[in-house]
Image: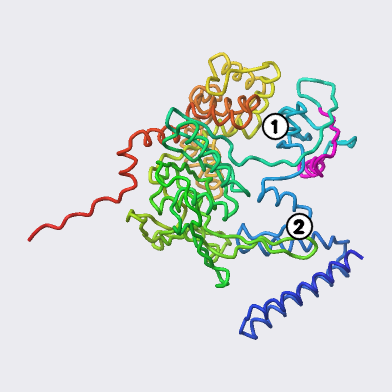
């Protein structure tokens, strides 16, 4: 019966699509015929597979695979959202879901609490990072996937949930009962004063209502705490709702200013978004922090404020996502998130980095070549460019983690040490005063030794690949001594590397430990100790002449009098 329903749905979809094509006015009968023909081929192919394939097939899985592969050939942002993923989709757009308020992750065969959110049921019930789920409402969790456990933890608000938990430092599990609630994650991770004059706000995502939260935080810092300049941190903010990005820009630019426009295949859907309200502040010095993880709505905000000469953009080049998605309702409570347009910020530039419409022969996607990058001008005449992300006004070096720190995070060494540390220390100093001193770093070193930790750097991996290629080309033997010498130089020694990269390892270790006691807000405060971007932003804001000069175009060369 289920198979027949799916076949009928596929046929109905074919009819709907064909009718839709006619509605949108495709003029070429040949194109309509090609679409109709291929939909019919798809339907008959599926019917024959279902009837004659040697093993039993799962129709729903097969169709979903076909849909996903089809959409993957377009771009990464055009996706099918099945009914069972609607809760996750709602969370991405609204920041809301019914659950316990905790991140979970897979550790071997176990599902553990990765981070409880402050003020929500998991944290209030005493769950801690590292706790292992044993049972949920009396049913075992062993061998379950993260997705399965997440689904079981979510549900209607105000409904009780019984959990059996095993703490890493204990052999006996304990039971807790909590009440699910509607979880609304605050998109403003932290807002506070860096000094007597400089305010700071970090925005994690552009979910519904985030512009109002930025407004509240800004007014609190300006009117009650005396901020005369502001840093807005959009680093690693992946974006979200276009409308919220427009509202956020509107907070700082004059009524009527163009913020962004969208242009796509369907001209009727093209739109120009302008500031529709009076700003809350159009003069306070602003710095927007960005990096490679700043994408989509983050780039609309930073790009628009740059084009309008309203803020100094500081950090690293952004991701370069200039594509707009629209959500379309499908049958059986499913949705299609489809790329419908490109967005253009006030100077007229589109900052999309990858050209998905012109793939390479192997299917890969290349960046836009320098020859196709164009120059644009800000409102005051400063030079800006399209072709891939927002280039900051003040560019800082790319700060990638060293291989050692990355591996310590990847293999959960940092996480496990923080779990052990928190189990034996009831409290730590406030986030702004907590440091990884010599004793604590030595304790971590001993913990690392007990785990027999080793790692291979990217340089070693690259050399191994090179040696394999040389062997295939029969060029290895004649250069063996050089390869051996290079391998010896590149082989990592954990003890020496731990000393060499102590600063970076201490930074990620402090972040993990502080999060156990002070949650996300505390981790942000602790990061100020060694945050080069924030330090540079404070320096620029403290020098009004430097700040103003960045937002002014260079003087035009004077012509020599004849």
The residue carrying mark 1 is 119
Left or right relative to 49: residue 92: left
Quarter containing the N terminus: bottom right
The extreme top residue here reads 439
Task: Give how far apart the Cα atoms at labels 1 and 2 are.
Answer: 31 Å
Left or right relative to 417: residue 190: left
Other residues around mark 2 within 10 Å, as few (<14) / some (14–19) / many (≥20): some
Please state which of residues 119 and 536 is positioned toward the viewer in this rendering: 119
Quarter containing the C terminus: bottom left
Looking at the image, residue 470 lies above or below residue 80 = above
Can you give x and y, in whole percent of width and height, for residue 487 in the image?
51, 34
Other residues around mark 1 within 10 Å, as few (<14) / some (14–19) / many (≥20): few
| Residue 161 drawn in magenta | yes
Image point (84%, 39%), residue name: 159
| Residue 496 drawn in magenta | no
The extreme left residue here reads 562
Q: Earlier in the sequence, mark 1 or mark 2?
A: 2
Image point (41%, 40%), residue name: 396
Label 1 residue SS: loop
Please state which of residues 85 and 168 is positioned toward the viewer in this rendering: 85
Can you give x and y, in whole percent of width and height, for residue 413 in the image?
64, 27
Question: Which mark lies nearer to you, 1 or 2?
Answer: 1
Residue 82: give its label: 2
Q: Which residues are magenta?
A: 144-165
């Amino acid at each position: 019966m289920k198979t027949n329903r799916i076949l009928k749905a596929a046929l109905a979809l074919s009819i709907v699509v064909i009718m839709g094509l006619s509605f949108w006015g495709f003029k070429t009968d040949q194109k309509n015929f090609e679409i109709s023909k291929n939909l019919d081929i798809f339907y008959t192919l599926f019917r024959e597979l279902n009837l004659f394939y040697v093993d039993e097939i799962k129709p729903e899985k097969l169709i979903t695979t076909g849909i996903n592969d089809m959409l993957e050939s377009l771009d990464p942002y055009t996706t099918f959202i099945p009914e069972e993923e609607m809760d996750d989709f709602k969370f991405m757009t609204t920041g809301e879901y019914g659950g316990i308020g905790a991140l979970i992750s897979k550790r071997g065969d176990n599902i553990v609490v990765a981070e409880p959110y402050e003020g929500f049921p998991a944290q209030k019930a005493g769950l801690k990072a590292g706790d292992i789920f044993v049972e949920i409402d009396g049913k075992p969790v062993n061998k379950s996937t993260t997705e399965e456990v997440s689904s079981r933890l979510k549900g209607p608000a105000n409904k009780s949930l019984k959990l059996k938990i095993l703490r890493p430092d204990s052999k006996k599990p304990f039971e807790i009962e909590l009440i699910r609630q509607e979880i609304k994650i605050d998109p403003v991770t932290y807002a506070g004063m860096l000094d007597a004059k400089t305010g700071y706000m970090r925005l994690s995502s552009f979910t519904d209502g985030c512009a109002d939260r930025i407004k509240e935080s800004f007014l609190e810092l300006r009117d009650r705490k005396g901020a005369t300049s502001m840093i807005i941190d959009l680093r690693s903010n992946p974006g979200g709702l276009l409308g919220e990005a427009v509202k956020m820009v509107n907070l700082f630019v004059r009524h009527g200013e163009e913020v962004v426009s969208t242009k796509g295949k369907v001209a009727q859907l093209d739109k120009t978004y302008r500031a529709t309200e009076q700003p809350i502040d159009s003069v306070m010095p602003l710095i927007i922090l960005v990096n490679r993880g700043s994408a989509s709505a983050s780039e609309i905000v930073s790009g628009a404020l740059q084009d309008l000469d309203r803020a100094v953009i500081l950090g690293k080049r952004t991701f370069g996502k200039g594509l707009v998605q629209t959500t379309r309702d499908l049958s059986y409570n499913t949705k299609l998130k489809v790329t419908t347009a490109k967005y253009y910020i006030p100077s007229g530039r589109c900052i999309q980095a990858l050209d998905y419409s012109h793939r390479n022969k192997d299917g890969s996607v290349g960046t836009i070549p320098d020859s196709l990058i164009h120059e644009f001008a800000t409102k005051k005449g400063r030079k800006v460019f399209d072709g891939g992300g927002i280039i900051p006004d003040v560019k800082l070096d790319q700060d990638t983690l060293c291989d050692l720190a990355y591996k310590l995070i990847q293999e959960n060494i940092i996480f496990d040490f923080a779990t052990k540390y928190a189990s034996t220390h009831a409290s730590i100093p406030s986030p702004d005063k907590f440091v990884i001193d010599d004793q604590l770093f030595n304790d971590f070193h001993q913990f690392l030794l007990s785990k027999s930790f080793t790692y291979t750097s990217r340089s070693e991996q690259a050399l191994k690949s090179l040696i394999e290629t040389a062997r295939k080309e029969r060029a290895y033997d004649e250069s063996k001594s050089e390869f051996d010498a290079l391998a010896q130089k590149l082989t990592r020694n954990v003890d020496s590397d731990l000393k060499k990269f102590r600063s970076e390892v201490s930074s990620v270790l402090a972040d993990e430990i502080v999060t156990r006691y002070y949650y996300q807000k505390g981790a942000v405060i602790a990061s100020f100790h060694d945050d080069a971007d924030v330090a540079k932003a404070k320096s620029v804001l403290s020098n009004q002449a430097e700040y103003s000069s960045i937002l002014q175009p260079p003087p035009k060369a004077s012509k020599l009098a004849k």
